[in-house]
Image (cartoon, coloured by chain):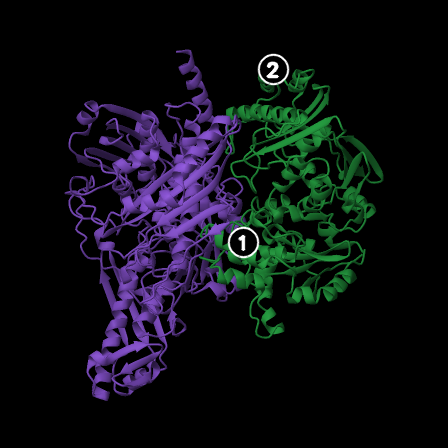
Chain colours: A purple, B green
């Protein structure tokens, strides 16, 4: 049985309702156009990337003669064909579009071939002869650490003297574990299509979360002004952070091919190429120590995250900062040192992935809670609760921000009750007592996730609203649609503002010539920021309409209101479309831009001072699992989630984000394993070897509820809260439940286990526990 | 001999004279037809975004099955009907106000799409469940969707949509004119050999074993294709040119299943889906292993014969069938021979199959009353994953003692292989003397030196192999003692006898 609990808002007409995703009907009919479905202009060439079979070294020679003479080939592009700057990095200038001189990882693109068909291009791309003067690659984080290789300097938060405090604490513990990476596996692979236009102009259709960055990259690469390049994205077939910075290379190559051949050019990566050539969630080696009292209350924490960034910086600064921002999850650390090393390796450059480093920070804090509970023989939930942020003395994060909107005590208590946690704990203990091979585990973990870009200048958004004389409305904004329902939510906001039905509001493709200079759609901020910008644009037009109606009908402005596709003007009521027609006749502009900059953000990275987040989103998850101690197999039996979205803009969409985010997080911590060989080649580069959750992995008993919120304490769009990323981290409860099940084998012993909890990792941990148990028995 | 491919496209006849031997169904739909509703997600039959429904006649009755169009060859569609997502919403025209297919309607109302890219495949997969004569419950829906990956929703709304729309009788336009479609498909089944191309490059789909044997004898360099769930990847991933393709899907003799009290005989062209029911009569674990081979899409096209013939060390059916002591028939020209299946696998990449010889059938003995059977598959993900290892045990038990053991493992060596030392170690063991089991399990280390790869390490493989033997002994011991016992599995739980 599956559960859900839509909560609707009664005071609004459209906002807060369970409106369908704006493209839902087109999705199910197969008529929603993705870039590969757009009819290709005549003469379109198709691109495929070529790469060397090595991970690190100098390019000795590149022979593409066989590529050039292959059937259907139109052009072969190498670094020297780039007229401008050979870089597709988001900031640091360290990601080459086409390798020049050296290669830094297996799969780095050395050339691209343009051919008349996709298949011809792919076949031709395999015909190059690339000689590499190989040097031994740094593959693991440990390899990189050994050579002291980094893409960025380390960064640290320090409060008090944690080492001294740990040493003088009643109890202390030290532990190390690995946190695995994750492939995005968006169903639509990376794709772009560039169409050359008038006077060197170029239109790039890109499946990207960041059209402005595509525009900048392409302009810089071609050596033209930003104004000559337009990037458009109607929708993505999934992104999850994987198309924030790393859509740029394929867009740039399409644009380069269009520039060189004069033809439209499309680049769609084959799935294996996509998985080999694009970055993933950062895997990290985590070493930590903690001091705590006999009740399990922390005295101090000292944690180091060694993060595999890959061959370049990409977004590693922000990602790893966020690991640090969330290394506390929901817990007060009286004294703390949180260190993050940004380790360079000869592997693909790791990038944004839903949660943006936060999940790694939280999985550490949850492992710490589990460890302390095992050591003290306490229920892990009690250790968690005693460490929650509290009032006055216990409300400052290690980075100095005051936690002012904490609801965890209430939220967790409610879930503890509704999930029947305490009774199930007893049942599980009884089950484990008599079951020789199967063991159950239970965990209830909280989430507290900071909302805002930690890079201050990204916290801005623009919108453009047009009202037409027939009363229909077009909305455009800087946010992109990747399935999360942003377009729907923003349309709801605009419909609410004008008091018209949603069907009169058309959201159009995100395009840099409509709303310029935008931030990426990321950090869960899409509806917070673009919703506000669109609301402001709509308000501007609405105020003009109110002024007009007040003048035309000689009534006070306060008597004018918009609802049910009508405008109430004093005692009379006219159709919204009638007023818009009147506005045109009276020469009143029906178009406006809107702009929003998130308030109260003051974080200064250099001084480590200020406020990085506008607010926190909260949630909690209770997970029950069964493991097989003979094989390490594991099944998630039941999951209960209670999550805080403030006053929901659209409960159906929010529940979709929560369920989908949880399952994605569960995949990260269970079945999804990235395996590199010792040569640095990714061995899991297709869905045949890389296993994301499928239907049967989702617990049959899956209960998801929205927290009955009185609204965001901050003045966000209709007092809602961001929901894109936080639910991913609810899945730490699954990992904790696995730990709990293994720990039942030998009370008091802490199971060593890395993420993901594959059958192999679980069995290794089980056998380690049995060994410890035997050793303990002999003593 | 016919020199064109004929199929139905949503009930309408399509006849093609120009079919490239390696052309995929997905490329035909997207590039030739311009029907872009069907998506390419992975190009290897693992994500299901390209799922379409294929109609064919089973015992004279029209049946729709989902397949992965990215790894189906266009020529294989001969004699079948193709329905894609682009066709479903056409039903609005036929049904007046009813715009959407019931499956689409349920997906819409349950918010079953987010990014929408997997959605067409999911709709088509559920369309086949809608038409299937099986109960739609959580288990059958999980199985139906195992080959349809969704990265956004977490599946819950899709499952709800399926629970709602796929129960009860089909009432859509496809059901209404099923008879017309059946008649048309019957007409397409002309029993003519199909051959498009010339001696250097062709797609052939013979209608009889006789023609198959003669073409293959003449072109031993041709590639025999049954379900294309492996060969499809040679084309889409290895980018190999396979100029000569012989498809066996139209060879009537190879589609046969026969059985008597002692054994079951399966033709080499029988799909997993069609073989499952009869093989399930041997033991529920056999059914469970077949259920976990690939996905619904893969089982609808892949064959047991193909699983054997390609010689993979990680195919799921060979260890199962070796433990059951199956026999394999091979044919070349007019000459046939039968061997023990285990002898077919000589070494990694090397099988006992002569040039021009093809697998024709598999004979599987049923269990005697004193034989107990267990099999287990271990993979990172339960559904639609390739085994890290697979174990199959057939134990003969007399008076509480194991008198004979026949054990085969997959994923533990270069071929699916018997555990001969372990079999010996088990002989004479008392099923109640559980303290002796561990020692017998140690013998697995003499039998196998597995490799480490992306699916599992060598160390894990050997430890899990031991664990599975212990589990089998424990389960059989309990069963023989007539005890219900404790739950022993997290998946594939056997129903109590």
Residue A279 seen by the camera: yes
Task: Please state which of the two labelled residues, at mark 2 or mark 1, is closer to the viewer.
Answer: 2
Q: Is residue A120 left or right of residue A661?
A: right
| Residue at disc 2, secondary structure | helix
Q: Residue at x 69, y 36 (%)?
A: B308
Residue A284 sits in which quadrant? top left
Residue A249 % position (x, y): 38, 51
Q: Residues within 10 Å of mark 2 (few under 14, many from 20)?
A: some
Residue A726 % position (x, y): 34, 48
Mark 2 sits on what residue?
B436
- Does B430 appear above or below B242? above
| Residue at disc 1, secondary structure | loop
Residue A484 sits in which quadrant? bottom left
Disc marking residue B257: none
Specify whether disc 2 shares its chain with disc 1.
yes
Mark 1 sits on what residue?
B49
Q: Is residue B214 left or right of residue A533?
A: right
- Does A473 appear above or below A338? below
Q: Nearer the viewer, residue A643 or B113?
A: A643
| Mark 2 vs 1, N-terminal side | 1
Residue B256 sits in which quadrant? top right
Q: CA distance from mark 2 to mark 1?
A: 50 Å
Q: Nearer the viewer, residue A185 or B73?
A: A185
Q: Is residue B224 left or right of residue A37?
A: right
Residue A28 % position (x, y): 52, 62
Image quarter of the C terminus of chain B: top right
Q: Residue at x 39, y 52 (%)?
A: A705
Residue A344 seen by the camera: no
- Does A224 appear above or below A398? below
Q: Nearer the viewer, residue B303 or A650?
A: A650
Residue B56 % position (x, y): 71, 56
Which residue is outermost to the top?
A779
């Amino acid at each position: 049985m599956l559960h859900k609990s839509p909560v609707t808002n009664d005071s609004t007409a459209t906002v807060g309702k369970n409106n369908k995703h704006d493209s839902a009907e087109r999705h199910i009919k197969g008529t929603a156009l993705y870039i590969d479905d757009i009819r290709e202009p005549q003469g379109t060439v198709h691109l495929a990337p070529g790469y060397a079979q090595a991970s690190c070294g100098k390019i000795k020679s590149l022979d593409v003669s066989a590529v050039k003479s292959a059937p259907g080939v139109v052009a072969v592009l190498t670094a020297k064909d780039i007229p401008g700057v050979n870089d597709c990095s988001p900031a640091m200038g360290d990601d080459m579009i086409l390798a020049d001189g050296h290669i830094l990882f297996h799969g780095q693109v050395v050339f691209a071939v343009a051919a008349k068909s996709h298949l011809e291009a792919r076949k031709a791309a395999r015909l190059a002869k690339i000689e590499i003067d190989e040097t031994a690659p740094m593959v693991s984080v440990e390899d990189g650490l050994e050579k002291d290789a980094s893409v960025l300097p380390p960064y640290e938060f320090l409060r008090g003297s944690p080492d001294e405090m740990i040493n003088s604490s009643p109890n202390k513990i030290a532990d190390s574990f690995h946190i695995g990476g994750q492939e995005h596996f968006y169903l639509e692979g990376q794709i772009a299509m560039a169409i050359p236009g008038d006077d060197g102009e170029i239109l790039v259709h890109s499946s990207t979360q960041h059209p402005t960055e595509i525009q900048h990259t392409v302009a810089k690469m071609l050596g033209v002004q930003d104004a000559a390049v337009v990037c458009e994205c109607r929708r993505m077939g999934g992104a999850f952070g994987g198309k924030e910075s790393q859509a740029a290379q394929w867009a740039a190559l399409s644009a380069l091919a269009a520039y060189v051949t004069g033809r439209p050019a499309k680049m769609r990566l084959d799935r294996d190429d996509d998985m080999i050539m694009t970055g993933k969630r950062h895997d990290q080696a985590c070493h930590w120590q903690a001091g705590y009292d006999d009740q399990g209350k922390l005295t101090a924490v000292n944690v180091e995250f060694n993060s595999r960034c890959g061959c370049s910086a990409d977004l590693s600064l922000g990602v790893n900062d966020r690991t640090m921002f969330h290394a506390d999850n929901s817990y007060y650390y009286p004294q703390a040192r949180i260190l993050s090393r940004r380790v360079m390796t000869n592997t693909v450059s790791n990038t944004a992935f839903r949660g943006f480093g936060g999940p790694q920070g939280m999985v550490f804090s949850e492992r710490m809670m589990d460890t302390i509970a095992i050591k003290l023989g306490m229920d892990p939930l009690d250790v968690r609760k005693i460490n929650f942020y509290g009032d006055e003395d216990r409300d400052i994060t290690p980075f100095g921000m005051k936690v002012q909107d904490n609801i965890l005590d209430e939220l967790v208590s409610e879930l503890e009750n509704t999930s029947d946690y305490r009774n199930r704990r007893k049942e599980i203990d009884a089950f484990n007592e008599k079951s020789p091979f199967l063991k159950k585990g239970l965990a209830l973990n909280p989430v507290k996730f900071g909302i805002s870009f930690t890079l201050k200048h990204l916290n801005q958004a623009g919108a453009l609203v047009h009202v037409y004389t027939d009363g229909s409305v077009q909305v455009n904004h800087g946010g992109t649609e990747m399935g999360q329902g942003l377009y729907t939510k923003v349309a709801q906001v605009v419909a609410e503002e004008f008091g018209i039905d949603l069907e009169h509001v058309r959201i159009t493709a995100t395009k840099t010539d409509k709303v310029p200079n935008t931030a990426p759609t990321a950090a869960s901020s899409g509806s917070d920021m673009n919703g506000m910008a669109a609301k402001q644009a709509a308000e501007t037009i609405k105020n003009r309409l109110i002024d007009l109606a007040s003048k035309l009908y000689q009534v006070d402005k306060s008597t004018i209101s918009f609802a049910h596709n009508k405008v109430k003007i004093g005692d009379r009521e006219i159709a919204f479309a009638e007023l818009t027609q009147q506005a045109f006749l009276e020469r009143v502009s029906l178009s406006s831009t809107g702009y929003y900059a998130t308030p109260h953000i003051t974080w200064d990275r250099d001084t480590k001072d200020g406020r990085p987040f506008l607010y926190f989103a909260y949630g909690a998850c209770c997970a029950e699992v069964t493991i097989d101690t003979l094989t390490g197999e594991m099944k998630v039996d039941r999951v209960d989630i209670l999550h805080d979205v403030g006053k929901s803009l659209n409960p159906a969409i929010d529940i979709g984000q929560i369920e989908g985010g949880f399952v994605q997080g569960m995949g990260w911590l269970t079945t999804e394993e990235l395996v590199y060989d010792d040569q640095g080649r990714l061995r899991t580069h297709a869905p045949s070897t890389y296993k994301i959750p499928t239907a049967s992995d989702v617990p049959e008993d899956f209960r998801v509820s929205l927290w009955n919120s009185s609204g965001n304490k901050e003045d966000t769009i209709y007092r809602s809260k961001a929901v894109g990323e936080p639910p991913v981290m609810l899945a730490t409860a699954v990992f904790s439940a696995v730990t709990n099940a293994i720990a039942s084998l030998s009370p008091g012993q802490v199971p060593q286990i890395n993420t993901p909890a594959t059958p192999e990792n679980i069995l290794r941990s089980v056998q380690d526990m049995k060994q410890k148990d035997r050793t303990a028995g002999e003593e | 001999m016919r020199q064109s491919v004929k199929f139905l496209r949503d009930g309408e006849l399509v006849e093609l004279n120009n079919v490239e031997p390696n052309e995929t169904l997905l490329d035909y739909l997207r590039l030739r037809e311009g029907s872009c509703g069907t998506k390419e997600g992975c190009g290897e039959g693992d994500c299901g975004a390209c799922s379409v429904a294929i109609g064919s006649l089973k015992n004279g009755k029209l049946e729709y099955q989902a397949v992965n169009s990215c790894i189906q060859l266009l020529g294989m569609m001969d004699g079948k009907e193709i329905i894609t997502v682009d066709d479903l919403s056409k039903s609005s025209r036929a049904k007046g106000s009813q715009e959407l297919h019931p499956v689409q309607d349920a997906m819409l109302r349950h918010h079953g799409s987010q990014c929408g890219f997997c959605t067409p495949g999911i709709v088509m997969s559920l369309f086949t469940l809608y038409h299937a004569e099986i109960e739609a419950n959580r288990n059958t829906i999980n199985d139906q969707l195992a080959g349809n990956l969704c990265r956004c929703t977490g599946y819950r709304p899709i499952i709800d949509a399926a629970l709602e729309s796929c129960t009860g009788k089909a009432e859509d336009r496809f059901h209404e004119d099923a008879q017309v479609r059946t008649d048309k498909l019957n007409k397409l089944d002309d029993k003519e050999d199909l051959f498009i191309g010339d001696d250097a490059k062709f797609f052939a789909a013979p209608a009889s074993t006789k023609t198959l044997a003669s073409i293959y004898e003449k072109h031993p360099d041709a590639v025999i294709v049954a379900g294309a769930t492996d060969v499809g990847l040679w084309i889409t991933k290895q980018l190999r040119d396979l100029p000569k393709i012989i498809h066996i899907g139209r060879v009537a003799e190879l589609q046969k299943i026969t059985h008597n009290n002692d054994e079951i005989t399966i033709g080499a062209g029988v799909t997993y889906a069609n073989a499952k029911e009869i093989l399930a009569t041997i033991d529920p674990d056999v059914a469970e292993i077949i259920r976990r081979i690939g996905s619904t899409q893969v089982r609808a096209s892949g064959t047991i014969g193909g699983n054997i013939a390609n010689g993979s060390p990680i195919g799921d059916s060979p260890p199962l069938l070796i433990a059951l002591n199956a026999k394999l028939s091979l044919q070349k020209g007019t000459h046939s021979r039968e061997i023990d299946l285990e002898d077919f696998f000589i070494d990694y990449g090397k099988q006992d199959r002569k040039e021009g010889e093809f697998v024709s059938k598999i004979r599987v003995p049923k269990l005697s009353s004193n034989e107990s059977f267990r099999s287990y598959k271990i993979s990172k993900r339960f559904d639609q994953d390739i085994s890290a290892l697979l174990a199959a045990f057939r134990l003969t038990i007399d008076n509480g003692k194991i008198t004979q053991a026949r054990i085969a493992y997959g994923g533990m060596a270069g071929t699916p292989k018997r555990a001969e030392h372990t079999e010996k170690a088990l002989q004479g063991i008392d099923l109640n003397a559980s303290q002796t089991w561990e020692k017998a399990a140690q013998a697995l280390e003499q039998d196998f030196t597995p490799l480490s790869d992306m699916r599992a390490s060598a160390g894990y493989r050997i430890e899990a192999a031991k664990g599975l033997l212990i589990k089998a002994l424990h389960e059989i011991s309990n069963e023989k003692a007539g005890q219900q016992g404790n739950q022993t599995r997290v998946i594939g739980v056997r129903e109590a006898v």
